[in-house]
């Protein structure tokens, strides 16, 4: 059998690879900061609701390609409130998770050899999908001081093949939250060139809910430019139910229905019911969890102020801390050594694009803050490891 060369060339699935370096995933001293997953289950009320729906047979069927109307409506209302802008049921298509939202949006926008602009570091699955589809990725360089992309650099990268700019805010892997002004500048650039601005806001519920993350939904013309991607995975702890969404204009939604029909047919019905319950009943629970995470971000920043620590925190927010390690070996070797000698699991910066070998990503949402001192202690000890201090890239 011969395989698609684009798939052969694509890097291995990162989380699975990092886990393959761990000997015992159930070890009691394991500190797991690998994958971005909520540390808690959904509330019991959601689980009970779902059990009832599933045992009645609801959830076992396909839904409309775009998803069930009450969920589309509830998400549109959530967007109206969160962004103080306009969004309607017809602007929403429910997907099998936010990853599938991205893949379908890209398939709707781009053909092979088209180009997409991604800021570095970038979310690995975005990069992987673009390379599997034979789409050229143009990168915006990483500024470790601002941890935000520079719109002037993007101007230089746009050409007749460019179909979209992708922003992830709050960012995976840096945790950086882009300012409304930065997002607006990219929006105006995309609009000027008649290309899409894809904004993946998987982590938007974990930042200050009183301030709209950006003003784009308040622009009456947003449907011509914005493609908003959302996930129910983290906000309601539904990662296994594979439910996400796209909010976009009628042009993109209309075309994307063809892609959805061929791939998912419809997003998982049970996940849609769970997400609807979340939007209708779990507002306070969501805010409570968001506050816990915001507090955790403050605590991880404080933990990295340890005077003997040579690991430098570049940025922390939402789910992630992006950290510069002190060694002259590549980030894979650092992560492997931290696993082998200290049972601390993180991800290498190299998974997030070029020139990221100086960094590692710690997904702090997974780990209660009571473990932070222990984590810092392990990082301190790693500074003595011969393996790391003597080797060169
Ligand atoms: C930026 C970003 N987008 C999308 C996803 C995937 O979300 P979902 O579980 O909804 O597919 C993740 C998950 O880690 C992510 O970090």
Image: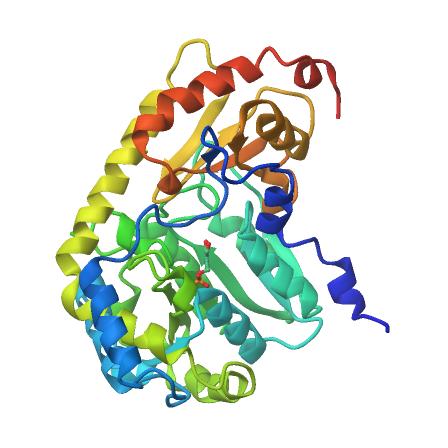
| Looking at the image, residue 237 lies above or below residue 121 | below
Task: Give the total of numbered labels.
Answer: 0
- The correct choice, above or below, for 223 with respect to 69 in the image is above
Q: Quadrant of the N terminus?
A: bottom right
Residue 193 can be seen, yes or no: no
Q: Is residue 121 left or right of residue 93?
A: right
Where residue 76 appears, x then y in whole percent?
Answer: 24, 75
- Compared with 245, 305 (above or below) is above
Give the left or right position of residue 29, taking residue 281 as reference: right
The residue lying at 58 percent from left, 43 percent from top is 141
Camera-side residue: 214 or 221?
Answer: 214
Residue 161 drawn above or below residue 386: below
Camera-side residue: 22 or 9?
22
Residue 375 lies in what quarter of the image? top left
Where on the picture, by quarter, is residue 114?
Answer: bottom right
Colouring used for the render: rainbow
Position in image of residue 94 (x %, y %): 38, 77
Image quadrant occupied by the C terminus: top right
Q: State which image quarter holds ligand 1.
A: bottom left
Residue at left offset 63%, top offset 64%: 130
Residue 388 in view here: yes
In the image, 185: left or right of 83? right
Q: Residue at x 32, y 22 (%)?
A: 302
Measuring from the top left, give residue 287's x and y in whole percent.
18, 51
Question: Camera-side residue: 57 or 182?
Answer: 57
Residue 151: x and y in percent read 48, 51
Give the quadrant of residue 335.
Answer: top right
């Amino acid at each position: 059998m011969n395989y698609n060369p684009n798939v052969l060339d694509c890097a291995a699935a990162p989380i699975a690879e990092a886990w393959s370096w761990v000997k015992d995933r159930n070890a009691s001293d394991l500190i797991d900061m690998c994958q971005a997953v909520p540390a808690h289950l959904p509330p019991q009320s959601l689980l009970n609701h779902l059990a009832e729906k599933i045992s009645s047979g609801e959830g076992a069927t396909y839904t409309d390609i775009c998803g069930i109307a009450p969920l589309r409506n509830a998400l549109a209302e959530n967007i109206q409130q969160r962004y103080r802008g306009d969004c309607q049921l017809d602007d929403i298509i429910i997907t099998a998770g936010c990853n599938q939202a991205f893949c379908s949006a890209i398939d709707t926008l781009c053909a092979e050899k088209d180009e997409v602009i991604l800021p570095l570091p970038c979310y690995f699955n975005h990069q992987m999908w673009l390379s599997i589809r034979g789409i050229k990725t143009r990168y915006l360089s990483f500024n470790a001081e601002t941890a935000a992309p520079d719109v002037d650099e993007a101007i230089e990268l746009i050409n007749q093949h460019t179909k979209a700019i992708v922003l992830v805010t709050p960012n995976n892997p840096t945790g950086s939250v882009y300012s409304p002004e930065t997002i607006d500048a990219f929006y105006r650039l995309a609009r000027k060139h008649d290309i899409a601005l894809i904004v993946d806001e998987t982590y938007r519920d974990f930042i200050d809910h009183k301030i709209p993350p950006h003003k784009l939904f308040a622009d009456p013309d947003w449907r011509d430019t914005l493609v908003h991607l959302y996930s129910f995975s983290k906000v309601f702890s539904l990662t296994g139910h594979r439910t996400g969404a796209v909010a976009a204009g009628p042009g993109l939604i209309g075309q994307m229905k063809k892609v959805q029909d061929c791939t998912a047919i419809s997003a998982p019905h049970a996940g849609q019911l769970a997400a609807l319950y979340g939007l209708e009943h779990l507002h306070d629970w969501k805010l409570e969890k968001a506050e816990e995470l915001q507090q955790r971000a403050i605590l991880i920043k404080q933990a990295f102020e340890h005077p003997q620590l040579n690991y430098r925190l570049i940025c922390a927010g939402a789910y992630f801390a992006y950290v510069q390690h002190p060694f002259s070996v590549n980030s894979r070797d650092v992560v492997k050594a931290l696993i082998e000698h200290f049972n601390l699991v993180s991800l290498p910066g190299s998974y997030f694009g070029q020139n990221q070998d100086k960094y590692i990503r710690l997904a702090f949402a997974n780990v209660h803050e009571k473990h932070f001192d222990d984590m810092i202690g392990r990082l301190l000890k790693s500074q003595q490891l011969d393996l790391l201090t003597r080797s060169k890239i």
